[in-house]
């Protein structure tokens, strides 16, 4: 009776199924979270799931091997596509799942079997209408359908993650190939190492974040969580803090952050620190006597793939503190010109800096025409990059931030802060570059005081004017 009960529980509950196959599996609380989420996927209650977890913490065993076998056991007509960065790895997942279905334990639980004429490692059918296909990211799925699309690590390693071509290939394959094979009620599970800010998970979430549920569990807690406190290990019985710290020493903080903490940029390698970002309220700024400067790092396009135009509005007070508003936007040349006039009318800039190359090529002729038409002549300054790389220009801001000489106006620098915290590995740096150009033009403009050494009429005769 006890054995029959175990079999029935394994049919009903995913956790019990895994424990039936692996009696000695050390289930931790993070596995429980994964079990419950995958049960919701199987029932059709959860259609989009992302899983970010450290290596060797059970995510592939549970999601890519155990789950597919349980799914077809409960319904032998279901179709599964499993993809990974290489076809060989995907096929190996398929082999292990196939072997589970062929095992004596499985046959005690389910009546699903493999079709006699289709039992290859990476491509097999059930004794119903179900099918399993393993493919590498970039591989063809023509003619194959999926009730469950499981993508387990679409990028192989750091080298591929840092390649824009490889990231673009994975994104293109997902949109044009993998996603199109999903049935109308199908589910997607993405297991993803967070190698890069611009990875597949990030691109998907930019388009429709509301559709996805995310399980993101760092190896070492970075804040208090439901089941552990800040600084505690995720699977302390298996990977203790000492073990994790030794792994971190071997890998370095940058790689450890991506692989184990689900953070493409780690705090130890950040060049700009969050604690450097001092805040000043807009109302307080209005009471100060300031000189205003605008710098623009342009990207003249409205296409989704184009870079943003970065804009930095800087109010320099009499103590030489910078007070910044900085943001990004996608504009065509006409809209950018309109924005410059609108901002200048409100702020009355001492100087408006635009990068020389882009300014001369795309902006200058239209801007001059508009100044004549509107009878408003702007204090345009051509910014010079002087063959200095963008990274070096942005690093020029570090001394000012370190010395506490920059304020961010409340809620006006979100884009800038995101770019600086991820510099130099972030996807975008347009706002940071626009801010770095302030180093060329921002200065304290002191009020002019006239000292008259003789009657004013004498000035016109002797031109004796001292400033």
Image: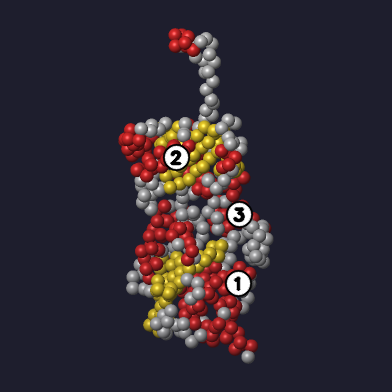
Which residue is pictured at 59% across the width and 79% down the height?
16
Q: Which mark is residue 32?
A: 1
Which residue is pictured at 34% across the width and 36% down the height?
370
The answer to whether residue 420 of the structure is visible from this angle is yes
Left or right: residue 245 compared with residue 444: right
Name the image quarter holding the N terminus: bottom right
The mark nearer the N terminus, 1 or 3, is 1
Which residue is pictured at 52% across the width and 9% down the height?
454
Q: CA distance from mark 1 to mark 3?
A: 26 Å
Furthest-bottom residue in this view: 1
Q: Which mark is residue 343?
A: 2
Foreground: 167 or 461?
Answer: 461
Residue 394 image position (x, y, % from top left): 50, 39
Residue 304 image position (x, y, % from top left): 38, 53
Mark 3, residue position = 248
Crowd rating for badge 3 (residues with CA inside 10 Å; few <14, some 14–19, many 20+): some
């Amino acid at each position: 009776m006890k054995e029959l009960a175990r079999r029935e529980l394994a049919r009903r509950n995913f956790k019990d199924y895994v424990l039936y196959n692996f009696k000695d599996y050390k289930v931790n609380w993070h596995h429980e979270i994964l079990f419950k989420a995958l049960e919701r996927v199987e029932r059709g209650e959860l259609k989009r799931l992302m899983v970010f977890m450290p290596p060797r913490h059970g995510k592939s065993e549970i999601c890519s091997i155990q789950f597919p076998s349980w799914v077809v056991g409960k319904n032998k007509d279901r179709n599964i596509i499993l993809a990974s960065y290489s076809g060989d790895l995907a096929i190996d997942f398929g082999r292990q799942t196939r072997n589970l279905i062929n095992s004596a334990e499985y046959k005690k639980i389910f009546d699903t079997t493999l079709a006699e004429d289709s039992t290859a490692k990476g491509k097999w059918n059930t004794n119903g209408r179900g099918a399993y296909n393993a493919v590498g990211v970039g591989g063809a799925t023509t003619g194959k359908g999926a009730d469950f699309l499981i993508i387990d690590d679409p990028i192989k390693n750091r080298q591929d993650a840092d390649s824009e071509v490889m990231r673009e290939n994975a994104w293109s394959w997902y949109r044009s190939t993998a996603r199109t094979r999903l049935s109308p009620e199908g589910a997607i599970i993405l297991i993803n190492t967070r190698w890069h800010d611009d990875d597949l998970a990030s691109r998907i979430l930019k388009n429709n974040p509301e559709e996805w549920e995310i399980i993101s569990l760092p190896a070492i807690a970075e804040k208090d969580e439901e089941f552990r406190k800040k600084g505690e290990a995720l699977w302390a019985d298996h990977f203790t803090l000492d073990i994790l710290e030794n792994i971190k020493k071997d890998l370095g903080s940058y790689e450890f952050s991506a692989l184990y903490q689900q953070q493409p940029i780690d705090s130890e390698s950040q060049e700009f620190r969050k604690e450097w970002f001092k805040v000043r309220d807009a109302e307080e700024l209005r009471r100060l006597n300031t000189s205003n400067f605008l710098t623009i790092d342009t990207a003249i396009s409205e296409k989704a793939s184009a870079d943003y135009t970065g804009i930095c509005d800087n109010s320099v007070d009499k103590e030489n503190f910078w007070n910044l508003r900085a943001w990004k936007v996608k504009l065509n040349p006409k809209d950018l010109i309109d924005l410059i006039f609108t901002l200048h009318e409100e702020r009355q800039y001492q100087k408006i800096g635009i990068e020389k190359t882009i300014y001369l090529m795309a902006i200058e002729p239209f801007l001059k025409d508009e100044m004549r038409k509107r009878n408003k002549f702007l204090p345009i300054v051509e910014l010079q990059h002087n063959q200095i790389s963008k990274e070096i220009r942005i690093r020029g801001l570090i001394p000012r931030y370190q010395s506490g000489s920059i304020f961010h106006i409340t809620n006006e620098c979100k884009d800038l802060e995101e770019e600086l915290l991820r510099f130099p590995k972030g996807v975008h740096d347009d706002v940071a570059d626009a801010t770095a150009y302030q180093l060329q033009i921002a200065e304290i403009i002191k009020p002019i005081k006239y000292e008259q050494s003789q009657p004013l009429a004498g000035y016109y005769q002797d031109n004796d004017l001292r400033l």
